[in-house]
Amino acid sequence: MGDSYRIIFIHAPSAWMSMFTYVVMAVAGATGLIWRIKLGHAVARACAPLGAVFTFCALVTGALWGKPTWGTYWIWDARLTSELVLLFLYFGYMALISAIEDKRTASRAAALLAVVGLVNIPIIHYSVEWWNTLHQGSTVTRLARPAMDIEMLIPLLIMFAAINFYFIASLFNRVRCELLDQERQTQWVKNLVHKHQMNGQAHG
Amino acid sequence: MVEFFDMGGYGFYIWISYGIFAVMLGYNYFAPLSRHKKLIQTLSLFYNRQ
């Protein structure tokens, strides 16, 4: 395998987060749909670009891993294709949000798309078992015994932890914007913007 | 030093991977921060017009 294994440390966490973010997005969208919790829609909207970034990273690092090890950047096998579909689901979600003028209608329609698209997640996960693919099977997430050297497993788990913290921080960043935009008619946003203005004047 | 960058012949693929990863994560982290700044400006204009 040579030194190309080093790509795994960013590829596997990105791929994991691409699916995890989608589940968070779909669940948040569903809570918005079912219980009409507007915060759910805000979280779902914040997840979409984040998930698209993770999916893009997983695909690109995967391609750069594939070239030296399999001899090709891309092949239309089950794992790679279903991951590409995931990227298009994120794009579709974002396109739907920006295509519909009314934010609440847009959020509801897009949440429905997210929930329906959830079917793709088990397909991605089990694709390496259901079909013959070039992609190797899971090595970390299987519980029996990790098929990996402890020296490689520890840094990989650290990367998994790190990217989860990154996800949380990044999600908060984005939800903050979504909420301010969504709640612009409320008094607390008015007060907050007013406070920012006062601070801005004091500094500049 | 050369050995470190070459990574047994895989250096090109590895460094491009890490580079793209770093750029994407950096962009994704800072984009909402600048959006927040713009949003505050947009909203203060919005309230002033009301």
Image: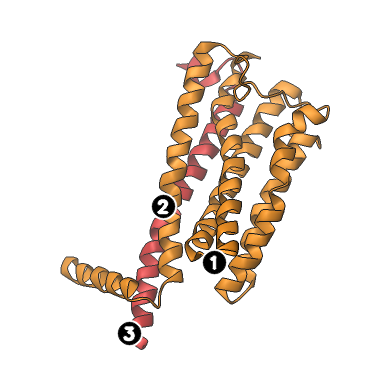
Chain colours: A orange, B red
Circle 3: element type: helix
Q: Is residue A100 left or right of residue A85?
A: left
Q: Is residue A62 left or right of residue A37?
A: right
Image mark 2: chain: A
Q: Residue at x 36, y 87 (%)?
A: B49
Amino acid of disc 2: Phe
Which quadrant is home to the N terminus of chain A? top right
Q: Which residue is mark 2?
A: A172
The 10 Å Cα crowd at callout 2, few under 14, some 14 to 19, many 20 or more, is some
Give the CA distance from mark 3 to mark 2.
Answer: 28 Å
Whole-percent x and y of residue A100?
63, 73
Q: Is residue A68 left or right of residue A22?
A: right
The tag on residue A36 is: 1
Q: Residue at x 69, y 23 (%)?
A: A68
Amino acid of disc 3: Asn
Q: Tell me where residue A192 sits by quadrant.
A: bottom left
All told, the count of numbered labels is 3
Q: Which residue is mark 3?
A: B48
Q: Nearer the viewer, mark 3 or mark 1?
A: 1
Give the CA distance from mark 1 to mark 2.
Answer: 21 Å
Q: Residue at x 45, y 56 (%)?
A: A174
The tag on residue A154 is: none
Q: Tell me where residue A15 sits by quadrant.
A: top right
- Image position of A14 with respect to A180: above or below: above
**Between residues A167 and B26, which one lies in front from this camera angle?**
A167
Question: Does the residue at mark 3 contact the one at mark 1 (Cβ under 8 Å)?
Answer: no
